[in-house]
Structure formats: structure tokens, C-alpha cells
Image (cartoon, helix red, strand yellow):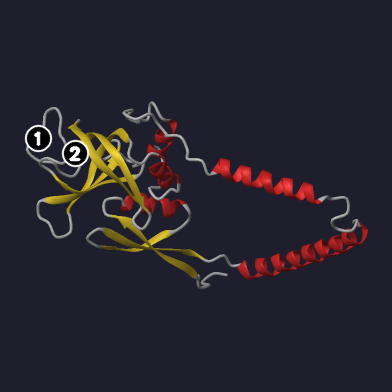
Amino acid sequence: MAGEDINYETKTVRAIRGLEARTVAKWEKDGWEVVSQTTGKLQTEIVVRRPKPKSRVLLYAIGGGALAIALATVITVGVISEKTAPAAGMGATPSARVGEEFTSEAELSESDEPAESAEPEGIVITAESNPEFAALLALGDYCDQSIPAFAEKYRGQSIAFDGNVGTLNNHVGYTTRYDILLGAGDHGETSQFGPAFQFRDVNLASDLHYVGDVPDTLGVSDNLQITAEVDEYEPSSCLFLVDPVETSFR
């Protein structure tokens, strides 16, 4: 009906500073629209909304009726099966049950054995050599659940990729140490992909281990060739923490 009020459902989501556009694009793709953005020191709060489905109550009613019919059918079949099935335990022997228990314990012991190393020591993981890393760098969602799985599997190993400086902020309480947000690929590309990598609490003079020609300053939008050691994925911020091994300017 024309002029009818629209009811909205609203969410507040958080984006890492410098990655707001990626977050907005993700939510808009799912049908949400941005209402407001509030920028903080490290994160931006984004309020999004979308119209509530009008037929939700009707769908719940239909779904509830279907569920009741399904439950009634299951109960009826269960009663019939119970009446026709032989008595529980007939034909089974104690030795069979014990054997099953021993088998389960053996399988459990095998599953508890430590996994082999993901990659041989000294091998630097790249998109060309490792399909998992290639898929990671192509992700559109920096909170994707494949990122913590990769970080856990390859913790302590080195990765190398073309990246760029997204943001550069002073580490809490310091004026000469920084938290550096790193994106995959070149800065300024229309679409940004991959995890939100971060060098945390680093000194720009020595901790980045520069090679090649080094400009006087490092700043936002600089394109880099990065080799880093996998540290951990931080679920609360969706940051993939890495430690610098070698950094060069592109």
C-alpha cells in the first residue's frame, strides 16, 4: 500500500580503520544500507539497516505447522518400529561390545597423534607455491573463518606477498613504535582483497628489516614486498598478526 511505513532491522558493525569500504561493500551486497559511520582511533562503527520481511509471521506459522506434522509422523513411525523390532540386546555378545570399545579407543589414540608440519622448515609460503595462501589473498571478507585456520596451521612459518600500507598508527603509549595495517596487492585498487595483516608494536627504523632502496619515510599507500612470520589471528578485531622478516619497497 502506498505510503505504508517500512519497518527496518538495524545492526552496528565494526570495521578496521582503512578498511571501511570493504566492510560497507560486503553488507550492501547482502541488501543492507549504511545509515551512519562513527570513526574511532582504531575502528569505525557503521550502522546499517534493511527492511524487515513483511511475511515473517506468516512464514513462522506455516513453518510451525509443517514442523508439527513432521513430528507427528516421526512419532508414529517410531511407535510402529518399536513394536516390530526384536528385543534390544538379542544376539549380541559381551565380547562384541568390548571389541567395539577397544576399536574406538584405538581410533581415538590415532586421531590424537600430532599432525605433521604444514611446510618444511625454511620454506617461504607464497601464493604460487601454496593454494591455501592463494585462496586467502583472494578473500573479500577479512573476517572469513578460513583465516584463523590458516594462521593456526602455519604459525611460525614465513609468508611472502605483495602488499601495501593501509594505516599507520602509534602503538598505545609510544611515539616511535607503530601498528601498521597491511593489505594485499597494490594500494588504491578498486577492490581490496585478502586478510587484514598487521605489524604490531614495531619501530620503523630497524624492526622491518629493509632490503634494497629505502626511502626516507614509510607512509600510508606505500606498496611493499613483504616477507613475514605468521603469528596469530585475533578474532575480536579480525586482524591477522604477522612479524616482519624482510621488507622492500615496490
Relative to residue 212, is residue 94 depicted above or below? below
Residue 140 visible in rendering:
no
Q: Residue at x 21, y 33 (%)?
A: 246
Contact? badges 2 and 1 (CB < 8 Å): yes
Q: In the picture, residue 43 is in which quadrant? A: bottom left
Dot 1 falls on a residue whose secondary structure is: loop
Q: From the image, tell me which residue sits under label 2.
A: 222
Residue 66: percent from left, percent from top = 75, 64
Q: Nearer the viewer, residue 224 or 51?
A: 224
Dot 2 falls on a residue whose secondary structure is: loop
Residue 236: percent from left, percent from top = 36, 58
Residue 35: percent from left, percent from top = 37, 64
Pick out the residue farthest to the right: 84
Relative to residue 89, is residue 11 depicted above or below? below
Residue 173: percent from left, percent from top = 14, 60
**In the rendered structure, which amino acid carries the disc numbered 1?**
Pro
**In the rendered structure, which amino acid carries the disc numbered 2?**
Asp
Mark before the other along the chain sequence, 2 or 1: 1
Label of residue 248 in the image:
none
Circle 2 crowding by C-alpha within 10 Å: few under 14, some 14–19, many from 20: some
Q: Nearer the viewer, residue 86 or 89?
A: 89
Relative to residue 78, is residue 230 depicted above or below? above
Label of residue 215 in the image:
1
Q: Residue at x 45, y 58 (%)?
A: 32
Residue 64 visible in rendering:
yes
